[in-house]
Amino acid sequence: MSQQIKKAFLDTEDGQILYRIGGEGEPILLLHMIPRSSDEFQELMSILVEKNLVIAMDLMGLGDSDKPPRVYSVADYANTAIALLDKLGIQKASIFGSLTGGYIAGEVAAAYPNRVDKLILCNLFGFDAEEKDKILYRYSQGFTIKADGSHLMEQWLSRVNYIGNGELNHRCVLEDLKCFGSPVYPGIAIANYCLAAPERFRLIQCPTLILSGGNALEPLEKAGLAKAENQYWLKDVIPHSQRVELEGGTLWMVNQMPTEIVKSVIDFLQK
């Protein structure tokens, strides 16, 4: 199945963006969370390509895309998504955004309403001013390379309680290491955008699915980066949205529960 999915690069004035593409049919663009890459959608793509044209891009500064020459805004990232659709000759697509990618997907829907068919926001958490400052500091500093190599074990252990010691953790650590030694640009963009997001998302008119995992907030709560009481904003600002919560779903459920997620997505897209 993976042979149906190709890799290519989009050339922009700010550098190259890697994207994966496969399948035929109605297009759906997948936008990943940080510090992942389009690899987050490996399992999802292998199923969705059966009936859809599926595209997943590495956000600039992560994965195998170039680092941007300046601090990007969420609007900048939304523009790169539109640039990729333009490159592929796609006038209108559905968009699936995972956390960070959800903010960008929402901005695309708000800024380019005629380009978005349907919107799926996965594990898109809200943040208050205190959390915004923590996120901005954390991702402005980036990840530090340590002379004794202890940063490698730290990254391995950082999510082991949620995804274990297997292949998925290995994939995540590889993606972590690609953004070491520099700011994590999409994280800075989200920090600078999150407080304005409710007002921007009120502009979203397309059919919207809010998809969440029952256990997805836990690691962010433990890190002091999100609070349960801040997680009702999407329902308020997109009142026409539908909601699906997957029992037991974690922040990494896109990899861990692809069959369940695809079922929710396909049911929504076919309505």
Image (spheres, grey):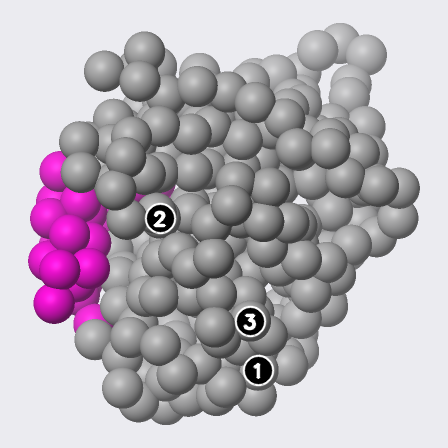
Q: Quadrant of the N terminus?
A: top left
Kind of residue indicated by mark 2: Ile
> Is residue 45 rendered magenta in the image?
no
Please state the horizontal and vertical placement of residue 133, each as a whole percent of the image: 72, 67
Instruction: Provide the secondary structure element on which disc 1 rests.
Output: helix
Q: Which residues are magenta?
A: 243-271
Q: CA distance from mark 1 to mark 3?
A: 12 Å
Kind of residue indicated by mark 1: Arg
Q: Does any portion of residue 157 appear in the rendered image?
A: no
- Quarter of the rendering containing residue 212: bottom left
Q: Which mark is residue 28?
A: 2
Q: Residues within 10 Å of mark 3 (few under 14, many from 20)?
A: some
Kind of residue indicated by mark 3: Tyr
Instruction: Provide the secondary structure element on which disc 2 rests.
Output: strand
Instruction: Provide the secondary structure element on which disc 3 rests.
Output: loop
Q: Does any portion of residue 184 appear in the rendered image?
A: yes
Residue at the spot of label 3: 112
Q: Is residue 59 left or right of residue 217?
A: right
Q: Is residue 254 left or right of residue 81?
A: left
From this view, report whether residue 68 is shown above or below residue 127.
Answer: above
Q: Residues within 10 Å of mark 1 (few under 14, many from 20)?
A: some
Please state the horizontal and vertical placement of residue 214, each as a whole percent of the image: 22, 58
Q: Quadrant of the C terminus?
A: bottom left
